[in-house]
Amino acid sequence: MNYPAFYDKVESITLFDPLSKVLGSYEEGKLTFFYKEIVKLAGHSCPTVGGAYLMTLRGLEALYPDTLPVRGEIKVEFKEDEKEGVAGVIGNVISNITGATEHSGFKGLGGKFARHSLMFFNAPIDSSARFTRTDTGKSVDLYYNPGVVPPDPEMQPLMQKVMMGQADQSEQKRFGELWQARVEKILCEHARDTEVIKVVVHS
C-alpha cells in the first residue's frame, strides 16, 4: 500500500488504555497511534484531518506532561454543532485516538471504562476544541489555524479542473501532490508553531 512518505515522519501518539489492559488486548495497555492509521480510518488526508491529529497530539502533551495520557478519561468539547462545517470530521479523528464518544461508545464493564458521554458539541467555548481530564479536571483549549500555511497558488486552478472532470492524469496527480504537500507542512514543519496550534492550559 503506497502513501506519501511524510506520513511516517509525523509524531506518533501513545496512550495508556486501562480497558485494553484488563481485557488483554495490548500488553500493559499501551496503544500507539500513527498518522497513517488515522488517514486510513478517515479515508483521506487533508488539513482538517491533519489538524485534528495535531490538536490531539499537542492537547494530550499539555494535559499529561509527565505521564501517558489515559484513554477513556478525556472529555472533549467543540463549540460547533457536529453537523456544522468540519466539526464531525474532527470529532471522529479525536474519538478514534482518545476513545471519547458522544453517545455510541462503550457503555462500560462493571461500572468502569465507559467511553460514551465524553464528547460534546455546541459547548460554550471559543476555542477549536477543549480537552479535560476527568480525574483532575485539568483542561486545555486548542486553537487551530491552518490558514497560516496557505496552499500553493497552483492548487486552486487544478482543483477546479479536477472537480469539473477536466483534468488529465498528470494534472490529477499534481493536484494530489500539492494537496499533500500542504498537509506535510502543517504536520511536519509547523507541528510546534504556536500560530498554527495555540495551546492554553487551565489547571
Image (tube, rainbow, N blue to C red):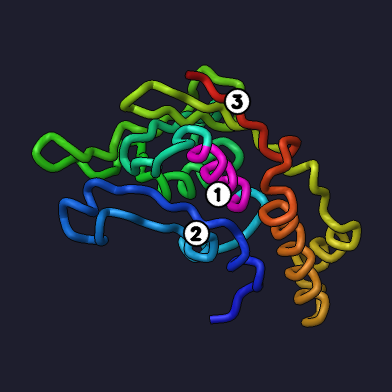
Q: Is residue 59 magenta?
A: yes
171 left or right of 107?
right
Say whether disc 1 or disc 2 marks the residue closer to the N-terminus: 2
Residue 141 on the magenta span? no
Q: Quadrant of residue 168?
A: bottom right
- Amino acid carrying label 3: it is Val
Question: Which residue was labeled with disc 2?
Answer: 38
Q: Which residue is mark 1?
A: 53
> For mark 3, what is the residue?
200
The image quarter in which residue 118 lies: top left
Q: How far apart in space, not on screen, are marks 3 and 2 (Cα)?
A: 25 Å
Which residue is painted at 31% across and 32% down in the image? 117
Magenta residues, as a range? 49-61
Between 154 and 59, the one lying in front of the other is 59
Q: Amino acid at mark 1?
A: Tyr
Residue 200 placement: quadrant = top right
Where residue 141 appears, as percent x and y from the top left, is 56, 27
